[in-house]
Image (spheres, coloured by chain):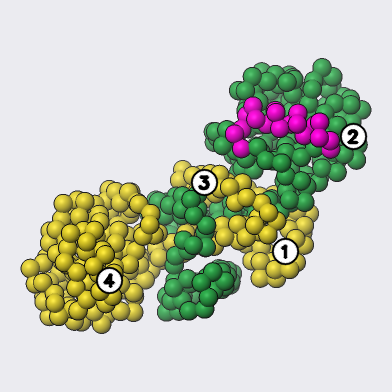
Chain colours: A yellow, B green
């Protein structure tokens, strides 16, 4: 397919590379920032543009991978070309595009991307939605050229998925940071804890998390929990977080195994 | 070495197997529960006992891998044999043993263990502490026979390490559970989110977590955060957790990059 990438951020970068690697032609890369457009365009052998009036109409698909609140305004400008267009946002309704064109859909890669980190796109779940069945079929076909995990997910489900992703990715990463900061404050190496982070995530690949929960809360080890709260006495926000998460673990365990 | 395992839980099981695999002789396995003692003893070709008076004195080391609050009382009983003894607890001071014998130390494997899951012990960080330098050397030597990651960590540091492990492992696992529950409530497959869990942990292996934070909070995307809080309106505890963690992420990002 001939694909135009609108955006030059993490998602735009990884999607453009995945399309290119799968043999698609990237026609243009648009970014408001000419330098960012040029950089990504260079990598995927496309033409950079920084003005939407420079759009090459010889394209099959606009992939709109920009900030959520810019999706609507940009879609409105692109609608005049009457091409298929998709956005890549977990939190944005299909309607943001459909308001301007029936030739619209969603192409949401459920992964955390960093520009400097390679990723095997074949393992990235791609969540597809479209305004019509015909477009859905077309997008699913395209998705399968870059990923082995293609799912049909409507806008309501996608919102839940995005919320779940915040709990499964953004919040754990923040907790890794809390751990790293606590260690650093006591001259301890973050490497000490990295194998634990790996193994915890690895367990969740084959088990349901509730069934492999470990730690003081699930053991109802009040002594250790109180010790930990004392260690956190200079961090009232972390104390509150510790208590809330521990209560959650106990509630989860009671739901699973009954009261102890 | 000739090693006696006191306990038959997750840590006892994995440590006993690691010692056995490294060529050490497991003399006996003690558990109050005779069946648990028999099960683990069978696996590591040791004699099971369920009464501490049956201890075989032809041993070099007692490894006390039992509940934190039982460590002191058991150590008191074992002290009469005047053998080297270690506990394996992150949250317990060396003093719990040293109160009864100078031939004491700590052998804390920093990992999350489940009985049903194999683990490559060579990658498990082992944190060593001892009452004397001589014992520290002996324990470090023993530790190196089963792990490539041996650290000297005193009791104060070990408490911090244990606290950090709760943030890096127990709490993220609980958040995986929250994600899984949210998905299940909307007929969505947990597999959709598993690659994200893997990648988030994989990033932390080579980066500092603060530098790879993604999601609505670090973007200051108020619209999405408010949408998420609305989606959680039937879960006030999760709303509170969501707000607290998002505030933490924003604070972390300001500390790292300044205010946006």
Q: Position of residue B35 (x, y in %)?
A: 70, 27
Q: Position of residue B29 (x, y in %)?
A: 74, 25
Q: From mark 1 to mark 2, how far is it between C-alphas?
A: 31 Å
Marks 2,3: beta carbons within 8 A? no
Task: Tell me the chief SS of the magenta region.
Answer: helix
Of B65 and A192, which appears nearest the observer?
Answer: A192
- The residue carrying mark 1 is A232
Marks 4,1: beta carbons within 8 A? no
Q: From mark 3 to mark 4, how far is it between C-alphas?
A: 37 Å
On residue A198, the disc is 3
- The residue carrying mark 4 is A35
Seen at 84% across and 38% down, the residue is B131
Q: Quadrant of the N terminus of chain B?
A: top right
Are dots 1 and 2 on a single chain?
no
On residue B5, the disc is none
Of B219 and B256, which appears nearest the observer?
Answer: B256
- The residue carrying mark 2 is B101
Are dots 3 and 4 on a single chain?
yes
């Amino acid at each position: 397919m001939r694909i135009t990438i609108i955006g030059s951020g993490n998602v735009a970068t990884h999607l453009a590379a995945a399309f290119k690697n799968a043999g698609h032609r990237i026609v243009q890369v648009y970014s408001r920032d000419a330098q960012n457009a040029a950089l990504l365009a260079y990598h995927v052998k496309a033409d950079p543009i920084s003005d939407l009036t420079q759009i090459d109409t010889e394209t099959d698909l606009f992939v709109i991978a920009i900030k959520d609140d810019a999706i609507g305004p940009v879609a409105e400008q692109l609608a005049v070309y009457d091409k298929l267009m998709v956005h890549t946002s977990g939190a944005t309704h299909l309607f943001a595009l459909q308001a301007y064109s029936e030739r619209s859909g969603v192409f949401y890669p459920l992964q955390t991307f960093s520009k400097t980190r390679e990723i095997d796109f074949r393992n990235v779940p791609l969540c597809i939605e479209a305004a019509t069945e015909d477009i859905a079929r077309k997008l699913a076909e395209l998705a399968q050229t870059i990923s082995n995990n293609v799912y049909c997910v409507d806008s309501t489900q996608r919102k839940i998925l995005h919320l779940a992703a915040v709990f499964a990715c953004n919040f754990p990463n923040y907790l890794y940071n809390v751990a790293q900061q606590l260690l650093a404050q006591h001259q301890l190496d973050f490497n000490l804890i990295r194998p634990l982070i790996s193994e915890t995530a690895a367990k969740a690949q084959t088990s349901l998390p509730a069934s492999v929960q470990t730690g003081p809360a699930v053991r109802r080890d009040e002594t250790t929990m109180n010790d930990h709260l004392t260690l956190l006495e200079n961090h009232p926000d972390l104390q509150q977080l510790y208590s809330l998460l521990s209560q959650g673990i106990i509630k989860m365990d009671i739901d699973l195994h009954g009261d102890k």
